[in-house]
Image (cartoon, rainbow, N blue to C red):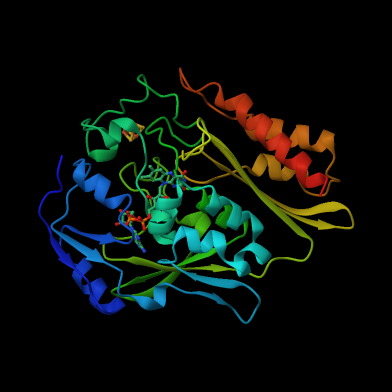
Amino acid sequence: MILPNFAYIRPRSLKEAIQHLSSEGSRIHAGGTDLLGCLRDDVFSAKKVVSLSQLRQLQEIRPTKEGGLQIGALVTIAELAGSKAVQERYPALAKAAAEVASPQLRNQGTLGGNLCQKPRCWYYRGEFHCLRKGGDKCFAAKGENAYHCIFGSGRICYIVHPSDIAPVLLAFDAKTRVAGPKGARWIPVEKFHVLPGEDPQRETVLRPNEILTEILLPPPAIGIRSSYRKVRARQSWDFALAGVALALQFNEGQVEKARVVLSGAAPVPWRSREAEKVLTGKRLDTETAVQAAEAAVKSAESLEQNGYKVPLFRGVIEEELTAIAKT
Ligand SMILES: Cc1cc2nc3c(=O)[nH]c(=O)nc-3n(C[C@H](O)[C@H](O)[C@H](O)COP(=O)(O)OP(=O)(O)OC[C@H]3O[C@@H](n4cnc5c(N)ncnc54)[C@H](O)[C@@H]3O)c2cc1C
Ligand code: SF4
């Protein structure tokens, strides 16, 4: 298919961009790696496409005076992966960014677009008028569901959230800054994505005329060790079948605070509070790693074809915790 017709606007200020987005049928264009595919495949339509490319203030990575980082939504995934500041302060974030897609897509795709990208369910991307597109049926529930979720579906919609970066941001307690007609608001990454039980047609809490402008990372805590591990079907570019972001804060050999966030698991980056509970207050050894991995998958609900994800997650979490214990 070819791209349908739409007006294309390149505003020079955030205010102008928000004004354009307030007209019906407008869509944001950042790197376009996801948006243009969705328009071409008629997943949704646009009357007006508003490019963010002229908004230079969204293209910077700046240290904050508290010791954290403020990262503009238009920073490319390649810049994120290659940034010395990110590598030194949040190594798991640099690693997750380096594992996104292919070099070409990392050069073109942006941080904001990565957090706001549409799901990859093949019914949604195909010609099926499913629940997420305003229809009345989820085709994946009893259909081809090998890559669908094992947590958080509410038995409504079984997408997996596609970003590798969002789970790591959540593990680091990052916040998003969102600008709209009424000014700016801050939303924790943990509250940025929407579960099907809240609204099966939205992936984020953004309103149509709001722009994600930046991400704020708090200073890395003393004694923190972090990692991101991703398993995919093919070693070349691919989305996560199962992944885990870990941010563990140690004090005198014990885990003081734990964040365990799964990718490829649920319609949103999935925080495993069960695993965090097992880890908190303990020494991280093989036994604790096994118990935490077991706890993480206890409430999983698999479909006909995705049952393999349960042992896969258990193994990935156990291995990654064991690796952190040795560092
Ligand atoms: C073949 C392929 C493989 C991929 N593999 C992976 C992978 O392994 N891991 C992974 O994490 N991702 C993967 N991706 C997704 C890729 O990372 C995203 O396409 C990319 O990050 C989107 O960024 P973009 O700037 O191109 O966004 P765009 O395509 O411009 O936008 C994507 C969506 O977000 C909205 N949007 C963009 N920026 C903003 C903003 N600042 N505020 C509000 N809304 C906004 C747009 O309106 C659009 O709906 C893959 C994509 C492809 C095509
Ligand atoms: S899983 Fe969600 S996106 Fe996929 S067919 Fe079902 S309702 Fe549609």
Give the quarter of the figure containing the N terminus.
top left
Q: Quadrant of residue 274?
A: top right
Give residue 63's position: percent from left, percent from top. Answer: 59, 77
The outermost residue toward the bottom is 65
**Does residue 59 appear to the left or right of 272 in the view shown?**
left
Q: Quadrant of residue 252?
A: bottom right
Query: 202 or 316, which is in the foreground?
Result: 316
- Number of numbered discs overlaid on the protein picture: 0
Q: Quadrant of residue 8?
A: bottom left
**Does residue 213 appear to the left or right of 28 in the view shown?**
right
Q: Is residue 63 something one can see in this rendering?
A: yes
Identify the residue shown where x is 35% and y is 59%.
206
Identify the residue shown where x is 62% and y is 32%.
313
The outermost residue toward the right is 252
Query: 182 or 306, which is in the foreground?
Result: 306
Give residue 214's position: percent from left, percent from top. Answer: 45, 69
Give residue 320's position: percent from left, percent from top. Answer: 71, 40
Q: Is residue 78 above or below residue 227?
A: below
Q: Is residue 278 something one can see in this rendering?
A: no
Give residue 33's position: percent from left, percent from top. Answer: 33, 51
